[in-house]
Image (cartoon, rainbow, N blue to C red):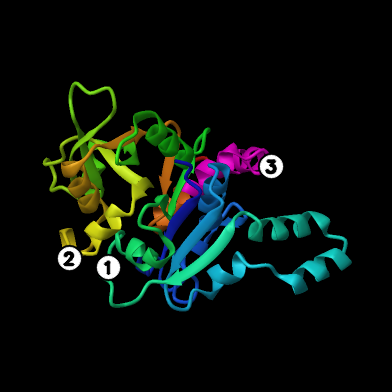
Amino acid sequence: MTITKAVIAAAGLGTRFLPATKAVPKEMLPLLGRPILQHVVEEAADSGITDVILVIRRGSHAITDHFDSAPELERTLEAAGKLGYLEEVRRVSQLANFAFVRQGTDLPYGNGSPLLAARPFISKDELFAYMFGDDVIDADPPGMRQVMDAYERYKPAAAMAAYEVPWEETHLYGCIKLKEGTEAPEIKDLIEKPEPGQAPSNLIQIGRFVVPYEVIDILDKREVGKGGELWMADAMLTLAQRKRVVAQPLKGTWYTTGDPLRLLQTFIALALKDDHLGPPLREYLKELRL
């Protein structure tokens, strides 16, 4: 089955970035001249996704405006002869066919709730991608494509991306235990934010999934978990207890931008790899004599 639709979660409150995120969604904070969310959408498009459902919160006009066409701006850029900028502006709205849905306040907090908000856009027999809007992946092939390829290879009920982190960070994420003796990396257990020393491994779930509608049905039971939130990890574990679910180790680098320090680290890491920004940034860092 060809996967062409992706739901992207962009409804977070961004409390760790306040007051910067009072009026601007955290997913729209800049990362190398583009919003964080655009990096995620570009990954989806590069993975073969043609239809993108962005789940947003109330007042996220910056998101809807960014991925819409901007005729007045385009005319201004064209008249000024700024054709490079014009091409970039036009390209954004052409990355995919976009739909926007607001996540209601009646839904529980948590990274599973955006799928409940997007439910009207998903058919019951449809397989689709789900992506966290603040997870940035630097990989070739793209991270989402790797998960889609794993699904095609192993034919499980669902697939997700997995990534190894330092053991001392495992309490921050959903940690995976894989089955032994299977060809595919099948999930045996998945624990959201385990207590220190209780993680089954240092392999964590990251925000790239291929899932069936059944996951929405599981989430719709509103069975909240750690911290009173509705977790994708809990829904995937429930599915794994019924059917085969694989966790594909990511080939590449995963960056989470969920707090100011990690966003800054991501910015520096990607800037150093950039052909234009990398050389002068390295020189500047040398001057600082850190």
Q: Which residue is under mark 1?
A: 109
66 vs 209, left or right, is right
Is disc 1 surrounded by few (<14), some (14 to 19) or many (20+) residues within 10 Å? some
Is disc 3 surrounded by few (<14), some (14 to 19) or many (20+) residues within 10 Å? few
Q: Earlier in the sequence, mark 3 or mark 2?
A: 2
210 vs 73, left or right, is left
- Is the residue under label 1 in contact with that under label 2 (CB below 8 Å)? yes
Q: Which residue is under mark 2?
A: 228
Q: Quadrant of the N terminus?
A: top left
What kind of residue is marked 2? Gly
The CA distance from mark 3 to mark 2 is: 45 Å
Q: Which residue is under mark 3?
A: 276
- The answer to whether residue 229 is seen in the rendering is yes
> Quadrant location of residue 249?
top left
Range shown magenta: 266-287
Could you tell me which secondary element the residue under label 3 belongs to? loop
Q: Choose between 243 and 277: the one closer to the eye.
A: 243
